[in-house]
Image (cartoon, rainbow, N blue to C red):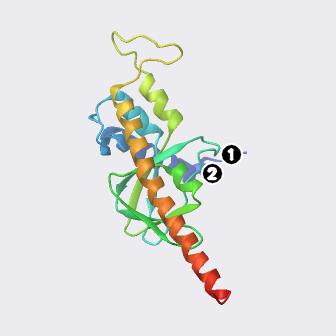
Amino acid sequence: MIKDGDFKMEARALEFLRNERRTQANLGLPMSLLNLQTTPSDWSIKMVAVCATRLVVPPRAIWTPLPADGPDGPVFSVLAKGRVEALLSISRRHVSRLSAGTFVPEGLIASFEAIMVGELQSEAYRVRLADLAVAASSSMVEGKQWKGYCPPMQEWYDRCRLLEKDSIAKLRFRFEVAQGAEQGSASVANFQDQGC
């Protein structure tokens, strides 16, 4: 039998989550942090905000990015506050420093078996690409027609995908350089060990 006081802790946790998501929606977080020419009052931006998961990364804490083939599908995050450092996970070689307002392509970072470490108290918001697409396509934009199987999208959606593409290109380059430097160092050490 369930008693009145059995679920007080769960009720408090749900109330906290409800208030957190309400605040996110009112501020349009995380999409309002990106230069997408949007406003927090846009209901499609609020829709993304309600679906976004808030992450708190304390200093020196490890943030493990989610792979693109994970159960939630591809995700990205937006760093809202603070600063994190992207590192190759085994060697801890520095790859990049990410600061507030940065688009974080988690799938790319995970594909390089990398991690992010908080340098300052940081806050990020994780968004599933599926949620982003639903929010962007949920409005029937006046005068726009479906193109094949693709519904009309909000204007900010294309800007967001361009930002994603640009972020991926820049970070991929940095990760490839870091991996190359790591492999070069290993080759030199191996060469020296052989007495050459």
Residue at image coords 57%, 50%: 10
For disc 1, the marked residue is: 2
Q: Nearer the viewer, residue 177 or 96?
A: 177
Q: Nearer the viewer, residue 172 or 46?
A: 172
Q: Amino acid at mark 1?
A: Ile
Q: Is residue 181 above or below residue 32?
A: below
Q: Amino acid at mark 2?
A: Asp
Element type at mark 2: helix
Residue at image coords 36%, 43%: 29
* Residue lying furthest bottom: 195
Q: Quadrant of residue 196?
A: bottom right
Residue at image coords 65%, 87%: 193
- Whole-percent x, y for residue 47 in the image: 42, 32
Label 1 environment density (alpha carbons within 10 Å; few <14, some 14–19, many ≥20): few
Q: Quadrant of residue 82?
A: bottom left
* Residue lying furthest right: 1
> Is label 2 in contact with label 1 (beta carbons under 8 Å)?
yes
Residue 63 seen: no
Element type at mark 1: loop
Q: Nearer the viewer, residue 141 or 49?
A: 141
Image-based side of 110 in relation to 17, left or right: right
Q: Which quarter of the rendered picture does the N terminus lie within? A: top right
- Whole-percent x, y for residue 153 in the image: 41, 23
For disc 2, the marked residue is: 6
Image-based side of 2 in relation to 180, left or right: right
* Residue lying furthest front: 196
- Whole-percent x, y for residue 97 in the image: 38, 64
* Mark 2 to mark 1 CA distance (whole Å): 7 Å
Q: Nearer the viewer, residue 141 or 114?
A: 114
